[in-house]
Image (cartoon, grey):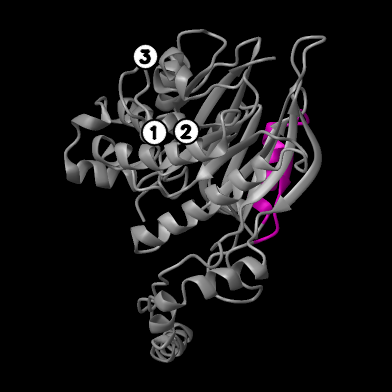
Amino acid sequence: MAAQFTSQEWEKIWTTLNANPESYGLPERIHGSVLLGSFNIRKLGSPRNRNRNTWSFLAHVCKRFDLLSVQEVMDNLGGINKLMDLLGPDFDIVFSDATGSFPGGSGMAERLAFIYNKNSVERTAVATDITYDRTKILEILARDQDAILPEMKKLKTYFDKLDEWKRSEDSGSKPKKPKIKMPVFLSFIRQPFCVSFRIKGHPEKLPYEFMAINAHLYFGNYVSDRRQEFDALMEWILARVKQSNRTYYSNFLLMGDLNLDFNNPEIDRPKIDKYLKTFNNNSGDDISVYFPFLNKHPVQRKFLKTTARMGETYDQIGLFSKDERLPSFADNGIMGTNIQGPDYGVFNFTELFSKSINNLSYSRLSKSQKSAFVKRYEHKVSDHLPLWIRLPLP
């Protein structure tokens, strides 16, 4: 593994960041606004896996947010507990149990967490996983049996290869795990986590109230499999939003690593946009579905990337709203034009690190230089960048 940044390099990073944090997308805390964000912090587990400088940097970033969804919190809670200690008494946390593997089984189990500033955000009564119940799964099996049955016949071969892989793993070798492709969605690889929150604003004004969903969807080897999970989650949210008389709050906020295929926005965006518009069309006039990061930022005039290698926008924030005070697609053109919001952005620490250490923009590095440089921090800081949305307080 590549060497981590030295203390001298961290001093350069802090000097560069402190001189102009907003130029790298680290959002400023502005009176009269609230910051909501998402950050996949790679394998946030044992506190010993990161050094003091890295922990200080992560805490500095997380402290900017009023509500932050965090993915890849490992079953070892030492790391998240250390982060919370560094954030201090103003912050609290709620997280799911481990999801992604059966207890004691193989696979990378992780927790999904929400960190929130108690001075501005109030956690309310609901905390739940999002699942498809047995009746729904049986309905899928029955409806799509013509596609599923041919794959079921391949299961014997798959399980033989899986047993062979497990034996090889136990012997110390590291062969590739066998793959199987299901033609339809059956269940989430990691159950999304949903918690209700309230954000109070100015006196006598109604607060923002919403169900926040933290999701880390399937990556895998097939784009079609990723799309199935995204479709299933969208279907669940929209169906729940429509039940406004039964939901705790009628507004939903999705913040997470959705692993959407969005590496070429000019080509990918029209396809995803067309798909999302079907949700808007089917949801009724009173429900807005808005994913700001699928659009060019109107001030920066570019699509924003969310991976440390600057190649993809896997991470997303989506609003499913009945509250006219929350931004919709029609408001995208005014994003960033008011200091208190609405606005959205990404903290591009890749550019920060490159400017500080290489004295060059990351885009000016050669392909091999980029690869070698990112290896220095993608495991210890993260391979994802934090993304955020700013809302004016109600």
Q: Which mark is residue 291?
A: 2
Can you give x and y, in whole percent of width and height, for residue 317 in the image?
51, 35
Q: Quadrant of the C terminus?
A: top right
Where residue 374 sits, quadrant-wise, is top left
Q: Amino acid at mark 2?
A: Phe
Mark 3 → mark 1, Cα distance in angstroms: 15 Å
Mark 2 → mark 3, Cα distance in angstroms: 17 Å
Magenta-tinted stretch: 77-98
Q: Earlier in the sequence, mark 3 or mark 1?
A: 1
Q: Which residue is mark 3?
A: 299
Of all residues, the one furthest to the left in this rendering is: 366
Q: Amino acid at mark 1?
A: Leu
Is 1 displayed left or right of 237 in the figure?
Answer: left
Q: Which residue is mark 1?
A: 294
**CB within 8 Å, label 2 to label 1:** yes
Residue 277 vs residue 111, the one in the foreground: 277
Q: Residue at x 53, y 25 (%)?
A: 389
In the depicted structure, whether residue 253 falls above or below residue 44: above
